[in-house]
Image (cartoon, coloured by chain):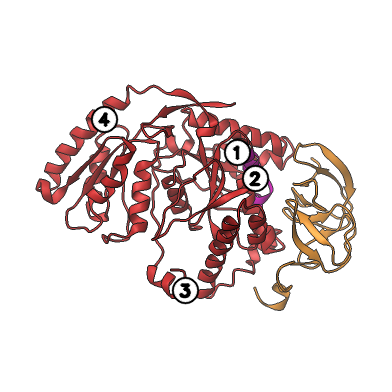
Amino acid sequence: MTEFYGYGRQDGSVGVRNHLLVIAPIDCSYEPAKKIAAQVEGAVAVTQYHGCGNDPVLAHNLVGTGLNPNVAAVLIVGLGCETLTADIVADGIRPSGKPVERLVIQEEGGTLKTQEKAIRILQRWAQEVAEFRPEPFPVSRLTLAVECGGSDATSGLSANPAVGVACDKLIDEGGTVIFSEPQEMIGTQHILARRALSKQAADDIYTMIDRDEARLKAVGVDSRWMSAGNIDGGLTTIEEKSLGAIRKGGTKPVQGVLWNDWDRFDRPTRPGLWLQDGTGWDVPSVTHMVAAGTQVVCFTSGQGSTTGHAVAPVIKITGNPVTYAQMEDNMDINAGTILDGSESLNSVGERIYRTIIETASGKKTKAEALGFKDFIVFCRSRAAEHMLGHC
Amino acid sequence: MGNKAIQIDERDNVATVTGDVNAGEQLEVIGSDGGVIFKLKVSETIPFGHKLAIRPIKKGEAILKYGEIIGVASKPIPAGAWVHIHNVGSARLPSRGREEGIL
């Protein structure tokens, strides 16, 4: 059984980093929260830009990020008049057993007084987590998220199939994989449903993907047909295009759909492959999978996406050798060797798997070393979802 | 450097070319373990990222890629021929495309 080095948490989860997370539940407190985090090594501040109402989607994704095992401690900095309060977020994270503190600017009497208390708390935590030492754990304790963005003709040919090989290996060893972007699954509903392990999972797969088709149709986009760019690039049918996308998750049976909406926020309840309902928009898609417990992310990109994530290391893989050569500063793995024949699909898959283990065990990805802390919470329009009959 | 065509799954009856290929070229079809499965002469020009048939495909037969049906042949396709919207339609949807002014 392959092992990685990680940090055991009180709730039984295993983290691969020790981030100190500062959550501004609403944008109003984000400026002070950012400045607070900037003053302490290892601290990162995040927020959401959908307003200060107590929207469950916003709460679930912020709480989920705080619960992520890569987060060692959480400080919530609220303003004071929001309905999505610091206490709502704190109460959601406290059951994990990790240190959680909250400060409210209007209670403290302004941002400067808040900053002083906040930095003192974070400084203490920074010194505590520096004493943590990683221990070996089996890879069955790992959850990997897979994303594709900035795709090109090589994505479905080299990068995604190679990542799929790594996903299959992780699942064979008892690990968990999540992928999302339902609009990139259009045309493969029947294939994914056939791989589902229960009727509920199969029904959820159809529901999730059919709803994304309906959303596109509502704005006049017929998702069944492809762009001229897709066709010129060699994609013949939407099934082929989406099969190239879903290949990044490997070939294993589908355990179920992880919903992420106003009624529920699901996390994987057993090992294996899971599909998360989400968006095709890169940074939020990754953010939502990390909120569901992902420790490491594999992100394929033919054209060269450079994003990272605030609390999970993002391994960038390109299947385009030209992109790798031009953007080596931001690309961790060159899967383009499959195209020039210098490496087989299977051996690149093995290399990706080893990189996942190494990254979990502490190796920094290029985005991580550059300090890219991307984080975006996405929330659909509840009114539109209601009008579409989705809720 | 010789061009190759990748067969992603062993059930596939098409392979995807890794560079622009000219008519008459000899091409190696490789599998996921990197091994050469066989060599094939290409009967027409095929651009990078596009597919060719690695065995003869009958009209109405399924086109298999990633081990799944990606479409159905709308004409008979000889081995080595280019496989794309001119001879394949979606298996799930009516066959429409750029030639009908949809895109």
User: Going from the N terminus, do you reach mark 4 or mark 3 first?
Assistant: 4
The alpha-carbon separation of the residues under discs 4 and 3 comes to: 46 Å
Which amino acid, by three-letter code, is at mark 1?
Ile
From where the camera sits, is residue A320 visible? no
Span of residues in magenta: A153-168
Mark 2 sits on what residue? A252
Quarter in which the N terminus of chain A is drawn: top right
**Which chain letter goes with mark 2?**
A
The alpha-carbon separation of the residues under discs 3 and 1 comes to: 36 Å
Are the two marked residues, 1 and 2, in contact with CB atoms closer than 8 angstroms? Answer: yes
Q: Colour of chain A?
A: red
Density class for disc 4 (Cα within 10 Å; few <14, some 14-19, many ≥20) is many
Q: Which chain, by letter, is orange?
A: B
Mark 3 sits on what residue? A388
Mark 1 sits on what residue? A171
Mark 4 sits on what residue? A125
| Kind of element beneath mark 4 | helix
| Kind of element beneath mark 1 | helix
**Which chain letter goes with mark 3?**
A
Are the two marked residues, 4 and 1, in contact with CB atoms closer than 8 angstroms? Answer: no
x, y percentage for residue B96?
71, 74
Seen from the viewer's position, the closer of residues B25 and A230 is: A230
Q: Is residue A69 left or right of residue A79?
A: right
The alpha-carbon separation of the residues under discs 4 and 2 comes to: 40 Å
Seen from the viewer's position, the closer of residues B11 and B33 is: B11
